[in-house]
Amino acid sequence: MNNKIKYSLVFVTITLASGCSNLGVEPWERDLLAKEQMALTSSPIDSALDDHIYFSKEASSGGKSFGGGGCGCN
Amino acid sequence: MQLVVDEKINRTANKTNLKLALTLATSALLGSTPAGAAPIPSDTSTEESWSFDSAFLYYSEADRVSAAEAIFNAKRTYSDDSILNLKLTVDALTGASANGAVAQPHVQTFTRPSGKGDYEIKAGNSPLDDTFHDTRVQVNAQWTQAIAINYTGSFGAHISKEYDYLSLGINSNIAYDFNKKNSTISFGLSHFQDTFTPEGGLPKPFTSMPLAYHDGDKSLHDASRQGSDDDKTTTDFMVGFTQVINRRMVTQFNYSYSNVDGYLTDPFKILSLVNTNGISQDYLYESRPDKRTKQSVFAQTKYHFDETILDVSYRYMWDDWEIDSHTVDTRFYIPLENGSYLEPHFRFYQQTAAEFYQPFLVQGEALPEFASADYRIGEMTAYTLGLKYGMKLSDGNDLSFRLEYYRQDPESAGHNAPGVLADMELYESIDAIIAQVSYSF
């Protein structure tokens, strides 16, 4: 069973890695991706404020960016 | 009519002057000359430019903590695309926070963290310590630049100071673009060094909360302490992969490893020691391990429909305290007329309890090695519902408003509630409102 999972993971990784070279766009096709709303963090200020709230109210932090210390709120 | 036009010109001029003044002030602080030291209107900015973001946030829980937080961010982009980012954050916290003890059918008296006074909690109420007041100032600086073809490096520093807490941090990140910049792989490291000097000192784990001293003799208080300050270090490692899927879609995957070492106990939290009828006999200070290793995987996708944009992310976190958590965060960007937009937000969060979490201790049972009744490391489900409205002002600057509702539902992790505790609310829900105004110029 464990081996099956391992092989599936290796298979998925190889497929993803080889698939990625076919993914993507040409430089002149970046009209939509270049919009600031399409940035992965489109509002850094909102993210910073949210991270602070959830860091101090929940047991998890980080993931998207560093979830380190920074305040005595937790 | 003329008056209205004049006013408009004046207002635009004032805003331009504000941006100019800030540009000059920031440059003066950095000892650099802004591009063209003579007054230049902001809209003729060249490749080298400053941009400023500011926000004010108000967070308020019903009957508990309120916080106000202000952020001012200055970003300078140089002609070679290097970026300097400076951020100032100031926040103030006030209100009441759960102390960890359970509600009782009678009035309870607790000693304040300083040891100097006490407070009473009515029968049937969750014990909240209302002495929380704190003001924090944080400064972040980040420098990002190309270090070779397709390689981007970034380095940053962080300092945060509260009345009883100091945090110093550094971070660095390197990113490599390949496949026509459709793929990016990145590695990041950060290290934080924190020092905690809590009011009243550090209580000894599992010591009885002493009675308050009102004048003079504080020997009982001192006997319950093990020093005045302690340290904590946090080291994070992160590897990320970003992939453009097609013209409309981009995805990101991150793996993070975080190692926290040092004083991880909350010196303000206690546990009720109850008898078999559920009646409190004593209050003991909590005790947590001095190490915690957290790991997480994070995935995010953004998809551009014809007009709207969907942003979905998922995080799975697990640690050696046996806390697992799932977080789903979704935003949907809907453009309106004239550059304004609406953005609904939904977030779902669920965590399991730390292995040493317990809502109370029972008399006669052996003391565990570690215990905490802090609901934030107990079993919990939470969700956030929000809406943001943004608009483009006539001078091209951005103004936005965000209003959100956040609810936490702590749950029992299978602990029986003996005697009177069966009738008490041990897992009280928390409702909070988040309101924010942001202005970018």
Image: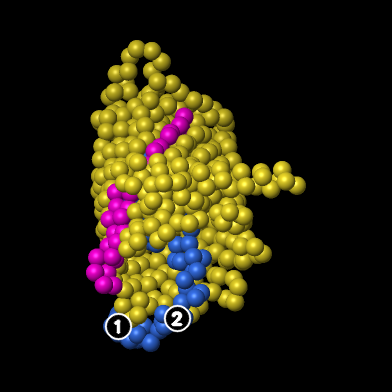
Chain colours: A blue, B yellow
Residue at 60% over, 57% down:
B392
Residue hosting label 1 = A10
Is B313 situated left or right of B153 in this image?
Answer: right
The amino acid type, in three-letter code, at marker 1 is Val
Q: Which amino acid does label 2 sit on?
A: Trp
Would residue A8 appear left or right of B95 to someone viewing this image?
left
Queried whether the magenta region covers residue B146, the answer comes back as: yes
Dividing the picture into quadrants, the one containing residue A63 is: bottom left
Residue B427 x, y percent position in the rendering: 52, 47
Tell me if residue B193 comes above or below residue B154 in the rendering: above
Label 2 is found on which chain of the structure? A
Is residue B276 visible to us here? Answer: no
Structural crowding at the residue carrying mark 1, measured as other residues with C-alpha within 10 Å and reported as few (<14), some (14–19) or many (≥20): few
Is B83 a magenta residue?
Answer: no
**The furthest residue to the right:** B1
Magenta span dominant secondary structure: strand
Same chain shared by disc 2 and disc 1:
yes
Question: In front here: B346 or B35?
Answer: B35
**Residue B10, how many percent across, how many down?**
61, 43
Q: Distance between the residues labelled 2 and 1?
A: 34 Å
Q: In this view, does A60 lie to the left or right of B392?
A: left
Q: Which one is nearer the viewer's eye here, B264 or A31?
A: A31
Q: Residue at horizontal 41%, vertical 15%?
A: B214
Q: Dot 1: what SS?
A: helix
Q: Which chain carries label 1?
A: A
In percent of the image, x 33 and y 68: which residue is there? B240
Q: Mark 2 highlights which residue?
A: A28
Q: Nearer the viewer, residue A30 or B176?
A: A30
**Residue B173, position as x, y percentages in the image:** 28, 61
Residue B172 location, quadrant: bottom left
Query: In the rendered structure, which segment of residues is drawn in magenta?
Result: B131-157
